[in-house]
Image (cartoon, rainbow, N blue to C red):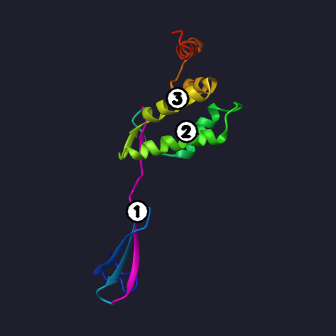
Amino acid sequence: MKCPHCSGNDTRVIDTRDSGDGIRRRRRCVHCDQRFTTYEQVNTAVHIIKSDGRREPFDRIKLLNGIRVACAKRPIASAELDGVVDRIDDYVHSLGKAEVPSQVIGNMVLDSLKTIDPVAYIRFATVYMDLPDLEAVRAEIDRLMGRG
C-alpha cells in the first residue's frame, strides 16, 4: 500500500473493521508516520456466458428492460417486475461464481413470468427460446396450458 502523503511503500495496519459492504483499515506510514484510511470491497462482478460463447457483465437494468418489453401493456405492477429482477440478482450473486450461463437467468425469468402472466411468458419465450414460427409458438402455448 502506497502512502498518499509521502508515496512511501511501507505501511502498517493499525485497525481493521467491518464497514458493512467491505473492510475499513486504518494505516500508518512507516516513513512519515502519517495515518490514512483504506476501504476494501469484495469484487462481486458476475459475467454472463451467452449461448454463442460471448461473455458480458451481468446487468440488472438490461434484464429489467427485457422483462418490461415482454410485459408491456399487461396488468403487471412495476414492483412485481422489480421483485423478479431482485430475486434473480440475489440468486446469481449467491452462487459465488464469476460466470453464470445465460440459460440460468432466462429460465428463472420464464419460471417467474409463467406464474405472473402467461401472455408475458409467451412474449419473452418467443425471443428467448427463439421460436421461429407460429407452430413453435402454438406448441409452447399448448405446453404451457398442459395440452402438449
Residue beneath label 3, please?
A: 110
Question: On the picture, is 11 further left or further right than 141?
Answer: left
> Dot 3: what SS?
helix
Residue 127, image x, y percentages: 56, 27
What residue lies at 60% left-to-right and 14% top-to-bottom?
A: 134
Residue beneath label 2, please?
A: 84
Residue beneath label 1, please?
A: 41
What is the quadrant of residue 81 in the picture? Answer: top right
Question: Looking at the image, is mark 3 or mark 2 earlier in the sequence?
Answer: 2
For residue 35, above or below residue 76: below
Stretch of the chain drawn in magenta? 33-51
Q: Quadrant of the N terminus?
A: bottom left
Residue 104, numbered label: none
How far is disc 1 from disc 3 in space, using C-alphas?
33 Å
- Which of the two marks, 3 or 2, is nearer to us in this view? 2
Q: Identify which residue, 115 or 97, lies in the foreground.
A: 115
Question: On the picture, is 145 further left or further right than 24?
Answer: right
